[in-house]
Image (spheres, grey):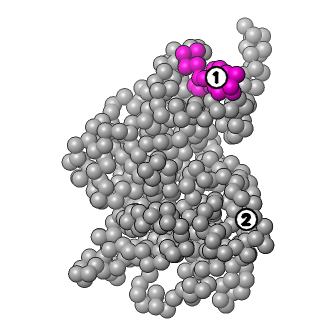
């Protein structure tokens, strides 16, 4: 009876920010345990929540009794507890979520074994903000489901307490009380990592599917905001690899079309002339190849090959910096044991690339009397001594990636004390320490 509840809790331990918009992932309000207990449904009307919605999507036979269709069978909070604006948003979600939870729903057959899968998808709002959905798919046969009916009286208080909890700041912990029949009351602690840039990212997925050189070429395509399509058989691989590719862009953010798993009804996305990064199940490969696409990098994660490419992916980045990245990735890779070690080992060289090419950005923001910054692009590019680095940076400063980053930097004279800024400071200190030694050698 409590098996499904336990699976929800296990998933929540891993998916700490389910359904939280990217722009709302802050510290949130600090609520005492007393206020959480006294909270009512009126709290659902606004403010930062631990998550926005929980949906249970099931496959049901359509009215003709033929194919299965994904249908929302449960949601939290209920529609009647939402404000009018939230109800309108919820109606839009009702149309999109089943498609993204079961992009392959029409292929499912009864009494067939399917693997459990955990993957994510992204929904972009009209104003450009995004909602991230974390989906855990379980196969529950009718006979089993009848014997494992979940009491809503048990689930509802748990989800209410979770949703009303303040979203923890990096390194902080939120503790929830959960009552499970036959198990009693338990306390669940959810801790957000101190460094959240690689939260829910598994860079091992890229290493399993691709070579270091191929990962580098995908990175080169992303920094110039090109069109990239990933192909894979299973949804988990697609989701993990695309999130991993985006994570390598830190401290920059991909602002264009981003669909980790494209439903069949949205395959026309690959015809877009604008930048995109999407994942498509490999069974749709012929539809993709038959589409009138512009230049694109088409990555087959199953075979570890590029089916299509622009052709210059190996020439986008400065040669010396490419070699440095490849050398760093190769060193000590056999000694890595934990996911955290792998993530740090793989992401580090790419962040060093950005530090060495654009880490001097703060020195080239001119500040006015009104406190508004003005980025000096020409001086910024000329500050690089390497011709190949200058050539790359002149292209990179024209991207949306860099523009959005600089727009934020121009708002405050004091750089945000984040992980990237910390690494810039460390790099500058190392450079100063090396200079006297180099002079002595000469």
At x 34% / y 59%, what residue is drawn? 263
Q: State the image coordinates of residue 60 (x, y, percent, origin top left).
A: 34, 79
**Is residue 340 left or right of 293 when viewed as pictured?**
right
**Residue stretch rendered in magenta on the structure:** 357-379
Q: State the image coordinates of residue 321 (x, y, percent, origin top left).
A: 54, 26
Q: Where on the picture, by quarter, is residue 416?
A: top right
- Residue 174 is tagged as 2
At x 46% / y 26%, what residue is drawn? 398
User: Where, quadrant-wise, is the C terminus in this rendering?
Assistant: top right
Residue 377 is one of the magenta-drawn residues:
yes
Can residue 135 be spotted in the picture? no
Q: Which residue is mark 1?
A: 365
Mark count: 2
Front label number (2 vs 1): 1
Q: State the image coordinates of residue 14 (x, y, percent, origin top left).
A: 61, 64
Q: Nearer the viewer, residue 255 or 351?
A: 255
User: Where, quadrant-wise, is the N terminus in this rendering?
Assistant: bottom right
Residue 366 is one of the magenta-drawn residues:
yes
Element class at badge 1:
strand
**Is residue 316 left or right of 288 when viewed as pictured?**
right
Element class at badge 2:
strand
């Amino acid at each position: 009876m409590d098996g499904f509840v336990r699976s929800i809790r296990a998933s929540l331990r891993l998916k700490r920010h389910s359904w939280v918009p990217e722009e709302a992932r802050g510290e949130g309000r600090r609520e005492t345990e007393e206020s959480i207990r006294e909270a009512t449904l009126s709290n659902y009307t606004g403010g930062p929540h631990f998550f926005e919605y929980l949906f249970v999507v099931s496959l049901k036979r359509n009215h003709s009794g033929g194919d299965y269709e994904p249908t929302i069978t449960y949601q939290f909070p209920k529609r009647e507890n939402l404000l009018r604006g939230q109800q309108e948003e919820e109606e839009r979600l009702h149309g999109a979520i089943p498609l993204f939870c079961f992009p392959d729903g029409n292929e499912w057959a009864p009494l067939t074994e399917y693997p459990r899968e955990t993957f994510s998808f992204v929904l972009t709002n009209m104003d450009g903000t995004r909602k991230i959905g974390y989906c855990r798919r379980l196969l529950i046969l009718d006979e089993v489901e009848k014997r494992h009916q979940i009491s809503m009286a048990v689930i509802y208080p748990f989800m209410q307490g979770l949703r009303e909890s303040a979203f923890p700041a990096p390194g902080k912990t939120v503790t929830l009380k959960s009552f499970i029949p036959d198990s009693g009351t338990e306390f669940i602690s959810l801790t957000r990592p101190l460094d959240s840039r690689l939260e829910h990212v598994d860079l091992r997925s890229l290493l399993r599917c691709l070579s270091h050189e191929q990962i580098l070429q995908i990175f080169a395509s992303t920094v110039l905001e090109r069109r990239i399509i990933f192909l894979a058989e299973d949804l988990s691989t697609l989701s993990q690899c695309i999130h991993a590719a985006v994570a390598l862009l830190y401290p920059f953010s991909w602002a264009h079309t981003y669909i980790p798993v494209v439903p069949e009804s949205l395959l026309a996305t690959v015809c877009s002339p604008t930048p995109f990064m999407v994942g498509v199940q490999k069974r749709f490969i012929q539809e993709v190849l038959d589409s009138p696409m512009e230049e694109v990098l088409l990555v087959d994660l199953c075979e570890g090959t590029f089916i299509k490419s622009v052709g210059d992916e190996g020439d986008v980045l400065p040669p010396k910096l490419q070699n440095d990245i490849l050398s760093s990735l190769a060193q000590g890779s056999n000694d890595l044991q934990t996911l955290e070690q792998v993530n740090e080992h793989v992401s580090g060289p790419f962040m060093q690339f950005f530090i060495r090419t654009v880490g001097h950005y703060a020195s080239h923001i001119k500040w006015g009397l009104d406190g508004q910054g003005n980025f000096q692009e020409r001086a910024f590019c000329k500050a690089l001594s390497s011709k190949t680095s200058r050539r790359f940076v002149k292209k990179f400063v024209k991207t949306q990636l860099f523009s959005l980053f600089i727009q934020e930097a121009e708002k405050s004279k004091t750089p945000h004390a984040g992980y990237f800024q910390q690494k810039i400071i460390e790099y500058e200190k190392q450079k100063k320490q090396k200079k006297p030694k180099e002079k002595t050698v000469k």
